Each structure stands twice: as structure tokens, then as C-alpha cells.
DNA sequence: AGACAGGAGCAGT
DNA sequence: ACTGCTCCTGTC
């Protein structure tokens, strides 16, 4: 395909695993097309390819300024230094070794917030579907290369705030529809200033986000880590919780969240958010299958102790 | 068939 | 403060 109108650029980062990063559950718009990853970033269509010498980006328009994608990909991160700052224990050693180029990326805070409101009790493919529907129906069309599927920007806060609950439910949001609507309207009304959050101290920023409907501790921490880049934000979902419990407190019968939070704060250091992402990836790719079977059984048994297995 | 999902909000204790 | 139920909807 001729693409003389496009622009491309390459960076010599060799410790960036595109596939691991784009499938790690932090962003939901990336699609694998002919061996490259394609999405809309900062209103532009972009394709990223892994090359032997680094990462290559292609855009669909003439483009001489690449700061938007460099910031999105956090190309300035010193990954070796970050990995070296992890706790020196067998678990984190395995987590590091399981994926050497996993990265955190910096998304638009609003898209990130909306996506994670949609994520509650959903699996990744379903979240991707919701985000796609929202973009198709409320976003603006983006210029894509010929032969590619049409794409839209993620809808603006104003556009979603002007939608109806029914319209959002039709995007498969279910009971999350009023949450997303309420959050969008909270931002439009000025009661939450997403730009101001960037300058806040972590705890203050978290509290501000948690005043939004549908935003609890976990989703707030996801936005703080994946959208704002707060280095010590540490989202605790059921997988991380189970992993920390079993790997660090195997003899504790019931691990309380408050105790876990104190451990996290004191243990994982200045790049705790990165540590969380590596731990999460490690658990999902190496330990996930063997653990998922157990929880199902144990939950059923706790509900009806008389039932025996087998 | 029915439990469950990468969670939040609510009532009840 | 903690527990248990409910909220849509698709999937196994």
C-alpha cells in the first residue's frame, strides 16, 4: 500500500514490549492489525510496530511533531532503573523475569476514567466493546489510511454529559450507565477539575476522583496510575489482592484490605505502580489458570458448606 | 442452568 | 468498620 502522505518515526528503545503493554489491561483501544498495534491517540490515528532496533510509529497525516506519542508511551522512563528499584524478593524477581519490556503508558485522564468506570466487573473484551461503541456513537471521525476500518476519537466529556442514560445503556454499560453519566456531568459542571488533579498530592487526588459516582478506590487508583502517572498509585483488584495474599502472607487465613494497604505503602517503594503492573502481568500469564479454578470451588463451598466436591 | 466477572453503593449490623 | 446483596449482560 502506498502511503506517501503518512509520516513515520522510529525510537531506539529496545526494552519496550508493545504486545505485553497493549494487552496488559491498562488501555482498551489498541487493535492488532497485520503485526502492528493501531489506535487513536490525541485525536490521531497511529500504528506502532516493534522492530529489532526499537519502536516505529506511523501516522495517517503529515506530522513533524511527535511529543504527543512520546509522552503517551512514556519513552523517557528509565526502565532498568525502575526495575532495579523493585523489592529484592523471589516474587518480584519472577515478575520482572516474566516480561522484560512491559511498560506503563500515560493515557488521557478522561478517557482513562471513563474506561475504568465501564470496567467494573467486566472482562477486557467487554470493556473494549463498550469503549468502541461509545467512540463510534459519540466520538468524532478520525482520518485513517485507506483499507483501514473507520475510527473515532474517544467522546468528549461534554458529548457524553449530553447523552441520555438510555443511550449509554445501549453501549452495553448496564448499571454503569448512570455512573458514567454522573461523572461526565460532574466534570462539565466544574465540581471535578481533571486538570487540577494532576497537581494534587496522591491522597487528595484519589479523594477527588472518588467523589464521582461509580469510582471507588480501585478505579481511582487505575486513573491515577494509567492516566496521570502517579508513580505510587497501586490499584488493588481481586487478582492483585489474591496474589499479594498468597505470595507474601501465605499463613494468614483472612487478609484484610487495610493491612494489605499498609504493606503496599511500606514495601513497594518509589515505583510501586510499575511493580503492581509487573505483578499483575506475572499473575495473569503464569499463575492465573491454576488460581481461577480454586476460587470458584472455595466460593461455592463457603456458600453451602454441606456440598462436597467430587 | 446458574455462577461468575479485573467493582461500587447501599443497607444492615 | 465489616459483611452481604444488588446492580446489566455476556460467557463458560
Image (cartoon, coloured by chain):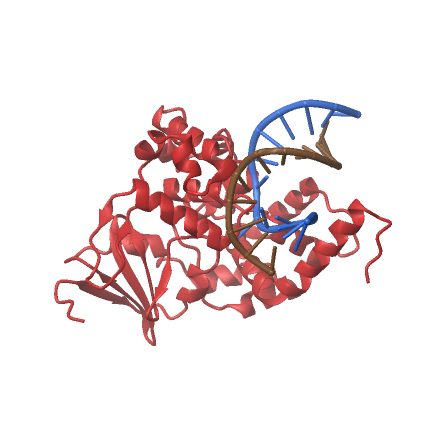
Chain colours: A red, B blue, C brown
Against A90, residue A191 (above or below) is: above
Q: Position of residue A218 (x, y in %)?
A: 55, 42
Q: Nearer the viewer, residue A246 or A200?
A: A246
Image-based side of A113 in relation to C1, left or right:
left
What residue appears at the point 32 percent right and 56 percent down from the top-left corner? A39
Number of labels in the image equals: 0
Residue appearing at x 44%, y 35% in the figure? A180
Determine if residue A154 is in view: no
Q: Position of residue A111 (x, y in %)?
A: 38, 43
Q: Is residue A235 left or right of residue A261?
A: left
Where's residue A174, x and y in %?
49, 38
Answer yes or no: is residue A7 visible. Answer: yes
Q: Position of residue A46 (x, y in %)?
A: 27, 58
Please identify the quadrant where the N terminus of chain A is shown.
bottom left
Residue that sits furthest to the left in the current view:
A4
Q: Residue at x 30, y 56 (%)?
A: A70
Residue in the foreground of this view, choosing between A256 and A214: A214
A214 versus A131 height, above or below: above
Foreground of the two, A167 or A157 = A167
Which corner quadrant holds the C terminus of chain A?
A: bottom right
- The part of the image, by quadrant, that contains residue A189 is top left
On screen, residue B4 versus residue A195, left or right, reads right
Q: Would residue A62 appear left or right of A225 to someone viewing this image?
A: left
Kindly give the residue lying farthest to the bottom in the view shown.
Answer: A52
In the picture as drawn, the residue positioned furthest to the right comes out as A306
Q: Residue at x 29, y 46 (%)?
A: A153
When the figure is inspected, residue A23 is found, relative to residue C3, above or below; the finding is: below
Amino acid at each position: 500500500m502506498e502511503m506517501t502522505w503518512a509520516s513515520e518515526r522510529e525510537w531506539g528503545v529496545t526494552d519496550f514490549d508493545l504486545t505485553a503493554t497493549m494487552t496488559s489491561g491498562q488501555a482498551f483501544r489498541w487493535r492488532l492489525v497485520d503485526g502492528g498495534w493501531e489506535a487513536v491517540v490525541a485525536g490521531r490515528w497511529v500504528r506502532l510496530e516493534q522492530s529489532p532496533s526499537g519502536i516505529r510509529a506511523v501516522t495517517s497525516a503529515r506530522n513533524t511533531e511527535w511529543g504527543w506519542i512520546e509522552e503517551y508511551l512514556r519513552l523517557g522512563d528509565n526502565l532498568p532503573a525502575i526495575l532495579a528499584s523493585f523489592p529484592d524478593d523471589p516474587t518480584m524477581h519472577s515478575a520482572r523475569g516474566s516480561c522484560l519490556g512491559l511498560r506503563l503508558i500515560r493515557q488521557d485522564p478522561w478517557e482513562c476514567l471513563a474506561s475504568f468506570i465501564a470496567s467494573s466487573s467486566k472482562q477486557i473484551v467487554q470493556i473494549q466493546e463498550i469503549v468502541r461503541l461509545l467512540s463510534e456513537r459519540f466520538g468524532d471521525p478520525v482520518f485513517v489510511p485507506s483499507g483501514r476500518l473507520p475510527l473515532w476519537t474517544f467522546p468528549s466529556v461534554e458529548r457524553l454529559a449530553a447523552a441520555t442514560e438510555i443511550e449509554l445503556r445501549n453501549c452495553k454499560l448496564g448499571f454503569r450507565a448512570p455512573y458514567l453519566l454522573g461523572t461526565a456531568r460532574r466534570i462539565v459542571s466544574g465540581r471535578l477539575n481533571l486538570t487540577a488533579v494532576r497537581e494534587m498530592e496522591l491522597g487528595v487526588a484519589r479523594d477527588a476522583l472518588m467523589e464521582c459516582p461509580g469510582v471507588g478506590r480501585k478505579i481511582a487508583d487505575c486513573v491515577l496510575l494509567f492516566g496521570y502517572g502517579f508513580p505510587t498509585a497501586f490499584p488493588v483488584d481481586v487478582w492483585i489482592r489474591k496474589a499479594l495474599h498468597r505470595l507474601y502472607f501465605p499463613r494468614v487465613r483472612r487478609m484484610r484490605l487495610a493491612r494489605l494497604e499498609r504493606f503496599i505503602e511500606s514495601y513497594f517503594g518509589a515505583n510501586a505502580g510499575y511493580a503492581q503492573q509487573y505483578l499483575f502481568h506475572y499473575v495473569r500469564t503464569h499463575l492465573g489458570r491454576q488460581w481461577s479454578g480454586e476460587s470458584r470451588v472455595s466460593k461455592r463451598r463457603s456458600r453451602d458448606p454441606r456440598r462436597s466436591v467430587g
